[in-house]
Amino acid sequence: MYDVAIAGGGPVGLLLAAELALQGVRPVVLERLAMPSGESKAGTLHARTAQSLDRRGLLGAVGRSSTGSVSFHFSGMFGLDLGAVAQEGVSIVGSPQSWAEQVFARRAAALGAEIRRGQEVTGLVQHDDHVVLTVNGRELAARYVVGADGARSTVRTAAGIPFTGTPAGVAALMGDVRLLDPYGVPPGYTRTPRGWIIVWLNPAGHSRVTTYDFRAPHADRQAPVTLDELRAAAEHILDRPVPMADPGALSRYGDAALQAETYRAGRVLLAGDAAHVHFPWGGQGLNTGLEDAFNLGWKLAAEVRGHAPAGLLDSYHAERHPVGARVLWNVRAQTALANPDPAVDPLRELFAELMRFDEVNEHLSGMISGVRTAYDVGVPGAGRMAVDLELKTGDGPVTLVELLRAGRPLLLDLAGRDDLVAEAAGWAGRVDVVRASAAHPADALLIRPDGYVAWTSEATGHPLRAALERWFGECDAA
Ligand SMILES: Cc1cc2nc3c(=O)[nH]c(=O)nc-3n(C[C@H](O)[C@H](O)[C@H](O)COP(=O)(O)OP(=O)(O)OC[C@H]3O[C@@H](n4cnc5c(N)ncnc54)[C@H](O)[C@@H]3O)c2cc1C
């Protein structure tokens, strides 16, 4: 009997395995593929994901970080400055998905997670105190199961969780091809009255070519893509020949925006694309999934280890479902704005004008980069990620980010508050207490393992004790 079985060894499943293992739970990851595909859909990690990865010491390993001003787009309209909202320096990270997956796999394995490849989950049955999975025709029991098995999640279907939203209206094709007239195609994002072509140009090698055809969705999502089909789509959109050869990584997808109605059904939980799918505007899908993993890992570990307060595991759905719903909403808005119909042109021009207002720019950048994410933790002024701080402690200088790398809850006493430190002593062994000085307005902060502020001393009338009980369980002395 495993404590946790994770179906799907994609980036989300593997990061979740690392998060669980960091908390002392040894999960098993069941991945259908015998070998990683090596293909990367995603290539961008946003500022919030970078901050979370930094709080685990993984940021440097996953890719190349950019700091300062970074131009980004909304519905293909460039002009957002992600650097203006980045908070901690890193504005964006270039990280091929298949590489990030390897980094997470190594971390998970090093911490004791068991990763089994060539293992296909085909069904599950829930019992009162465990779940039985069918894996390669054999039974495997676990106390909890997480479906991180992608958009067509078997776990989600077998658990009877509805996946609802809006159907596809756009047909997208993607492939890495050798362009035979590389300077005959426009690089970057191009909208024509017939659709979109997006080209990441490599004149001497393979360029990534994506087409969005707004006439109709794919008749058959599973049909293999041919070079002729991608070429025809590119030629239709650009209305001229686009010679290409040597295709690789051909795929088709659509703009269906679907979300699991619940992220938890009994002992089954969903994370990543198994919980939410949408068109890739803004590169938000993987980022949202990785943030699911950071939110779920410590909560599920506390449940498995027997010290989770009532409702902690359900707070995963309560916190992450609205975040996913908002991503689907902003992506639907981007698709509507992207419509190639020239009647939409004035709306795009007006939107582009609005994007020049700092407040609008920051609102949209904050949404795409995830840094505006806040959870309702029931304490005014709390619920956002604690921004990094330079701390002076009795043991020398340290940053808040470094302190959070152990993945443990933290009471940060910044004003010699003996009363609060004495209160937290009832949670010794579960909540670390660090006394320090720093340039911060609050006397003290209670920070969750995922880096979010659960309580601040600035919230008068909200005792620390209630927050400790809400997130970390009963006091030992109780
Ligand atoms: C063109 C494109 C570009 C994108 N760009 C970005 C971007 O820049 N940034 C971003 O954040 N997101 C981007 N995304 C979205 C991103 O790729 C996905 O959100 C991400 O892959 C989700 O990761 P996951 O681990 O949840 O699922 P997946 O990556 O789908 O992994 C699921 C894993 O489960 C395994 N599996 C499936 N079924 C079973 C089963 N029954 N048993 C066992 N194993 C199973 C699969 O083999 C797979 O390894 C893009 C998507 C597309 C299509």
Image (cartoon, rainbow, N blue to C red):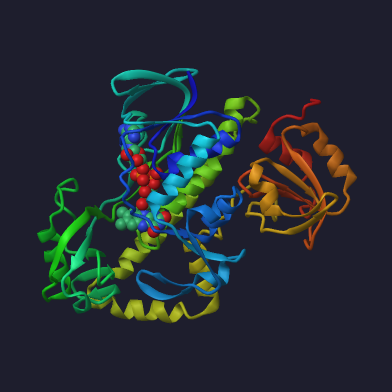
Q: Is residue 209 left or right of residue 57?
A: left
Among the 4 quarters of the image, the one containing residue 134: top left
Residue found 45% across the figure and 55% down from its top? 326
Q: Is residue 423 visible?
A: yes
Looking at the picture, how far across and down is residue 288, in whole percent? 46, 51
Among the 4 quarters of the image, the one containing residue 410: top right
Look at the image and tell me in which quarter the C terminus lies: top right
Name the foreground residue: 62 vs 462: 62
Name the foreground residue: 312 vs 280: 280
Q: Is residue 418 left or right of residue 328?
A: right
Please count the marks in the image: 0
Looking at the picture, how far across and down is residue 369, in whole percent? 50, 62
Residue found 55% across the figure and 43% down from its top? 295
Looking at the picture, how far across and down is residue 19, in whole percent? 55, 39
Among the 4 quarters of the image, the one containing residue 11: top left
Q: Is residue 276 visible?
A: no
Q: Is residue 396 left or right of residue 98?
A: right
Residue found 59% across the figure and 50% down from its top? 57
